[in-house]
Image: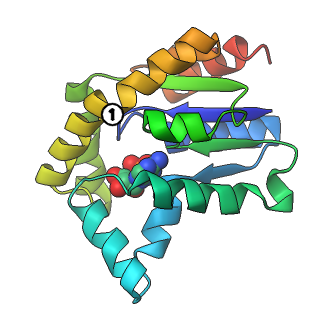
């Protein structure tokens, strides 16, 4: 099964993605994680990605789809995957035509996401790409560029909307039920 997990930063995508991966025995990958790893490289592309991420912008579609395409060609994803954070734009969704059987939209309000991100930072030290201005830009771009992706999948009849403002276990159970698992 090919599952897409999208939501605003702080919605709990990686928490739910990992739980789901364990339960369904489907490998999990996250474009945010891939980009954070690339951003550590002391190369031209590494520095560029770091700069874009830290400012709260999206990596350009062309680069993003090339990277995702390369990853998903790997043997481990042949029988399915749970991909977190992709597609985030209509251009990415159009590229990803047959890439999703189900799309889970983990819904939380901007206010709740902001509250969780400040808690996350307080807890584990500030992540470089989670400064207040980067978070604000990311929320703006989420509404502008990613919201249309939900309409795209809603029209295809594969969008599952999940209330993400509940206990982790409750959300997990709800996702499983709506996936028919
Ligand atoms: P995330 O951990 O999913 O919030 O992603 C962290 C950052 O990685 C984002 O703010 C973007 O800069 C970049 N990124 C992750 N996924 C994508 C994507 N699908 N398209 C463009 N940029 C992305």
SS category of the residue bearing label 1: helix
- Taking 95 as reference, is 78 above or below it? below
Q: Position of residue 41 (x, y in %)?
A: 44, 84
From the image, tell me which residue sits under label 1. Answer: 145
Tell me where residue 82 sits by quadrant: top right
Residue at disc 1, CB closer than 8 Å to ligand 1: no
Between 97 and 15, the one nearer to me in the picture = 97
Q: Residue at x 50, y 23 (%)?
A: 105
Q: Residues within 10 Å of mark 1 (few under 14, many from 20)?
A: some
Q: Residue at x 24, y 56 (%)?
A: 130
Q: Position of residue 100 (x, y in %)?
A: 69, 31
Is residue 27 shown left or right of residue 58?
A: right
- Taking 111 as reference, is 61 above or below it? below
Query: Which residue sits furthest bottom?
Result: 42
- Taking 114 as reference, is 103 above or below it? above
Q: Is residue 14 visible?
A: yes
Is residue 32 shown left or right of residue 116?
A: right
Q: Quadrant of the N terminus?
A: top right
Q: Position of residue 29 (x, y in %)?
A: 63, 52
Q: Is residue 128 visible?
A: no
């Amino acid at each position: 099964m090919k599952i897409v997990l999208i939501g605003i930063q702080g919605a709990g995508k990686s928490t739910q993605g990992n739980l789901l991966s364990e339960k369904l025995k489907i490998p999990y990958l996250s474009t945010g994680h891939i980009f954070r790893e690339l951003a550590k490289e002391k190369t031209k592309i590494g520095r560029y990605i770091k700069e874009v991420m830290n400012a709260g912008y999206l990596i350009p579609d062309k680069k993003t789809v090339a990277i995702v395409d390369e990853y998903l060609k790997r043997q481990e994803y042949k029988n399915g995957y749970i991909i977190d954070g992709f597609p985030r734009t209509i251009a990415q969704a159009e590229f990803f035509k047959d890439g999703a059987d189900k799309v889970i939209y983990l819904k939380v309000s901007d206010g709740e996401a902001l509250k969780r991100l400040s808690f996350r930072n307080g807890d584990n030290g500030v992540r470089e790409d989670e400064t207040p201005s980067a978070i604000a830009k990311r929320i703006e771009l989420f509404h502008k560029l990613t919201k249309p992706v939900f309409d795209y999948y809603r029209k295809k009849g594969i969008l599952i909307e999940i209330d993400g403002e509940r206990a982790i276990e409750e959300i997990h159970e709800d996702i499983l039920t709506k996936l028919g698992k």
